[in-house]
Image (cartoon, grey):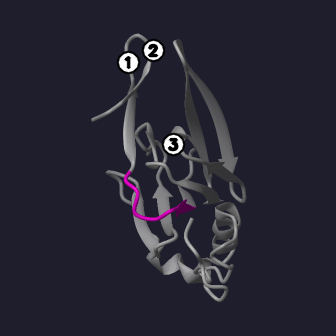
Amino acid sequence: MFAVPPNTVALSGTPASAHPALIARELAANPDRWRHLLHFHTDERFTTRLERTDRQEIWLMTWLPGQCTELHNHGGATGAFTVVSGALTEYVARASGAERPRHTVHRAVAGQSRVFGPGYVHRVRNEGPEPAVSIHVYRPARLPMIQYRVEAVDELRRVV
């Protein structure tokens, strides 16, 4: 774990030592800090990093209807995302030994957050009719995303 000086704050004004979901929610509630960065692209979802320290990264993402991520994890990071507007659907894949992976579906609407830890494999999609905006916090910073696919035999496999 990184040592955080007591006066270190995230963009939201919340101490950087706060839970990632709290940071994401408080930043989501302060659109004047990031509204000018909003863009929507028809080809793929838009992402821009709002902050990066040794301890964490904060990202702003926009999602047009139908836009999504691949099945992935965050390379051992923990974190959270908060939906600012619209709705996002999260598909969580959990491998359970020799059993086929289980998929859990969660829908998050404006004001709701989802949290995750190391080894958490998921896919996020805007299945609604309206654009969506979300704020994401990852700890530690600079860990690569690892993509996955579900094999024909229903087994979760890391993509190399």
Residue at screen point 46% across, 71% down:
38
Residue on which disc 3 sits: 125
Q: Earlier in the sequence, mark 3 or mark 2?
A: 3
Look at label 1 and name its amino acid.
Glu
Which quadrant does the N terminus fall into? Answer: bottom right
- For disc 3, the neighbor class at 10 Å (few under 14, some 14 to 19, many from 20) is many
Instruction: Give above or below for 86 relative to 92.
Output: below
Instruction: Give above or below for 29 relative to 143.
Output: below
- The magenta region covers 135-144
Nearer to me, 20 or 86: 20
Foreground mark, 3 or 2, reads 2
Look at label 2 and name its amino acid.
Asp
Residue 65: percent from left, percent from top: 49, 46
- For disc 1, the neighbor class at 10 Å (few under 14, some 14 to 19, many from 20) is few
Residue 138: percent from left, percent from top: 53, 60
Q: Secondary structure at mark 3?
A: strand
Residue on which disc 1 sits: 151
Residue 154's disc is 2
Work out how far the residue at label 2 is from the one at label 1, CA to CA, in angstroms. Answer: 5 Å
Residue at screen point 65% across, 89% down:
7
Residue 45: percent from left, percent from top: 40, 54
Q: Secondary structure at mark 2?
A: loop
- 141 in magenta: yes
Work out how far the residue at label 3 is from the one at label 2, CA to CA, in angstroms. Answer: 21 Å
Q: Quadrant location of residue 111?
A: bottom right
Total label count? 3
Instruction: Give above or below for 81 relative to 122.
Output: below
Look at label 3 and name its amino acid.
Arg
